[in-house]
Amino acid sequence: SFMVDPLGLQLIDHIGVEKVMWSSDYPHNESTFGYSEKSLASVVEAVGAENAVKIVSTNVKNFLGIS
């Protein structure tokens, strides 16, 4: 499941992409289960591929201190 927060995506320049991470809170009715790939594509479209990688991978690795 992949949650999409349109307002959060609009505020990334103010928040800083390094402070944003993907999270999962499955199972809930508001999740994107069944169309998560489309939801992730909308995030990539909103922030660009490089920043999307940070949001779904790099930032959490840095936070946890793993490589």
Image (spheres, rainbow, N blue to C red):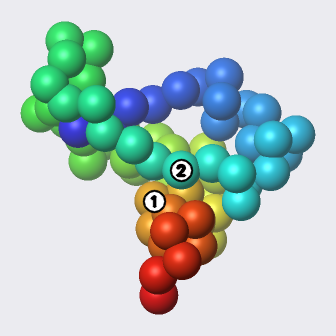
Q: Local crowd at mark 2 within 10 Å, few (<14), some, or many (≥20)? A: some
Instruction: Inspect this view and state whether residue 26 appears.
Output: yes
Residue 46's quadrant in the figure? top right
Total labels: the figure holds 2
Indicate which disc, 1 or 2, sits on the residue closer to the N terminus: 2
- Give the secondary structure at mark 2: loop
Which quadrant: the N terminus? top left
Q: Position of residue 58 (x, y in %)?
A: 54, 72
* Residue 56: image tag: 1
Q: Position of residue 6 (x, y in %)?
A: 58, 25
- Give the secondary structure at mark 1: helix
Q: Which residue is the site of mark 2?
A: 21
Q: Amino acid at mark 2?
A: Met
Looking at this view, is 6 or 31 the one in front? 31
* Figure check: 21 above or below 2: below
Looking at this view, is 22 or 65 the one in front? 65
